[in-house]
Image (tube, rainbow, N blue to C red):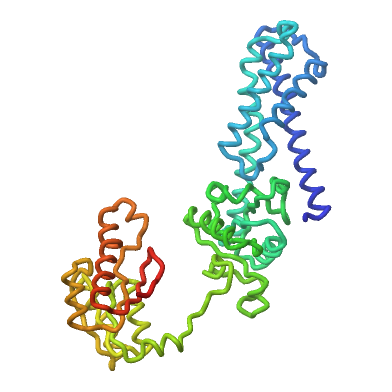
């Protein structure tokens, strides 16, 4: 919740902006009349204040409210704000035409009406752009080394974070984002709330943010996944504030920013494997790892080696990956027997040859493509390698009556 002082200051600034805009409406209307009659060397028939002028100001104020002109901030005025100003000016012109049509626009020159939306847009837009330019100049010259930070969330965690960022002097909070409707346009310790979480890409670009910080420690797993996806879409680095449980457990310090961990996305503590059980099962065995040179297969080889297997057979289609994993295993585990077989596990002859020659106790099938966006355009090869090759390995193991532990990025592990 904002303090009473912040509410008063924020409301006062908004009313000041509204007063400025209505004064500009009056000034624009009067200047257009003066200019039109000055060209004719005549005195304008309209006094400085009249019922017509008050009606014009009231109609234009309604147009400003309808367009939502005061949801934006002068500090971040952009082309979108100028478009909104022109839209409001044009709506105001239409309202004036409708209201004064009862007297057929008597006393209002057509030239004034034609120029009115353009002149009013210039009078309203120019101060906003000048103010933004001045604030940008101040920011650059006050502390050019400060890293600009956009904060996601506007609760208690964000309040503490902004204080810590400003106290450090190395970071400059440039804005906040929050999905709460009643917070839009408000300020938190002088830092404006610029939109909703879904606006992170556009707001980060407009504010020239260099770092995103997720300050919503109460998010559940689904909410954190959504926010992380939004942050990743910007291409900017992002961090998160620690949860209370992490601070109490001693895993994080108060105010310390950390990278988003897998536990934040899971919404629960990770389930740790029973290493004693795994070690007792693998010790002294011969294992065959298909795709043993890949990212998943090579890690499987390392885990098997650490847990006491007697022999590892690496089935790999890439000779470079085969050489690399064999060299690594022989270097780190000199007592381990490492064998290699170059070939495609999707070839029934290759997998049957591997099973009959090396007679492994266990087969880990890790030969699969896992870059899903790439595979969406390579369906034939994805099906051949991830589905048909898996069927080929499983069929060969069943035929050979081997006990198989299957591990693939696209299916659940199962034991046959």
Q: Could you say which quadrant of the image residue 217 lies in?
A: bottom right
**x, y percentage for residue 407?**
36, 71
Relative depth, front residue between 77 and 221: 221
Residue at 32% across / 55% down in the picture?
375
Relative depth, front residue between 178 and 338: 338
Q: Is residue 155 left or right of residue 118?
A: right
- Considering the image in quadrants, where does the N terminus appear? bottom right
**x, y percentage for residue 152?**
62, 56
Relative depth, front residue between 67 and 147: 67
Q: Is residue 414 above or below residue 114?
A: below
Q: Is residue 218 above or below residue 315?
A: above
Q: Is residue 393 above or below residue 178?
A: below
**x, y percentage for residue 34?**
71, 15
Q: Is residue 207 left or right of residue 330?
A: right
Relative depth, front residue between 368 and 181: 368
Name the residue at the bottom extreme. 335
- Considering the image in quadrants, where does the C terminus appear? bottom left
**x, y percentage for residue 194?**
64, 48
Total count of labels: 0
Residue at 59% across / 69% down in the picture?
257
Residue at 61% across / 27% down in the picture?
86
Q: Is residue 249 left or right of residue 399?
A: right
């Amino acid at each position: 919740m904002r303090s009473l002082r912040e509410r008063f200051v924020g409301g006062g600034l908004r009313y000041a902006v509204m007063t400025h805009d209505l004064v500009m409406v009056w000034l624009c209307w009067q200047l257009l009349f003066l200019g039109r009659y000055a060209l004719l060397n005549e005195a304008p028939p309209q006094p400085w204040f009249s019922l017509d002028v008050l009606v014009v100001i009231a109609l234009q104020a309604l147009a400003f409210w309808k367009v939502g002109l005061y949801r934006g901030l002068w500090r971040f005025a952009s082309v979108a704000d100028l478009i909104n100003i022109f839209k409001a000016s044009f709506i105001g012109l239409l309202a004036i035409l409708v209201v004064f049509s009862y007297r057929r626009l008597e006393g209002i020159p057509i030239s004034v009406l034609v120029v009115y939306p353009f002149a009013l847009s210039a009078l309203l837009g120019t101060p906003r752009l000048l103010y933004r330019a001045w604030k940008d100049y101040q920011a650059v010259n006050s502390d050019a080394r400060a890293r600009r930070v956009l904060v996601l969330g506007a609760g208690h965690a964000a309040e503490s974070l902004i204080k810590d960022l400003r106290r450090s002097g190395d970071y400059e909070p440039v804005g906040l984002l929050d999905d709460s409707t009643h917070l839009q346009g408000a300020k938190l310790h002088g830092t404006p709330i610029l939109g909703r979480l879904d606006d992170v890409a556009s707001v980060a670009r407009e504010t020239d943010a260099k770092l995103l910080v997720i300050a919503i420690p109460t998010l559940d797993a689904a909410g954190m996944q959504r926010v992380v996806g939004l942050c990743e879409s910007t291409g900017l680095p992002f961090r998160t504030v620690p949860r209370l449980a992490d601070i109490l457990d001693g895993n994080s310090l108060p105010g310390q920013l950390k990278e988003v961990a897998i536990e934040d996305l899971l919404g629960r503590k990770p389930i740790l494997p029973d290493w004693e059980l795994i070690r007792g099962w693998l010790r002294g065995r011969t294992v065959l790892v298909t795709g043993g040179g890949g990212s998943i297969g090579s890690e499987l080889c390392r885990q098997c080696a650490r847990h006491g297997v007697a022999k590892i057979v690496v089935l790999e289609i890439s000779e470079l990956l085969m050489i690399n994993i064999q060299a690594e295993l022989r270097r780190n585990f000199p007592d381990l027997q490492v064998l290699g077989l170059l070939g495609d596990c999707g070839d029934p002859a290759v997998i049957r040859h591997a099973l009959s020659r090396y007679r492994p106790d266990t087969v880990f099938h890790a030969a699969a493509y896992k870059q899903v966006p790439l595979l969406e355009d390579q369906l034939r090869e994805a099906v051949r390698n991830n589905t048909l090759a898996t069927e080929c390995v499983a069929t060969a193991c069943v035929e050979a009556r081997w006990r198989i532990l299957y591990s693939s990025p696209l299916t659940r592990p199962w034991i046959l």
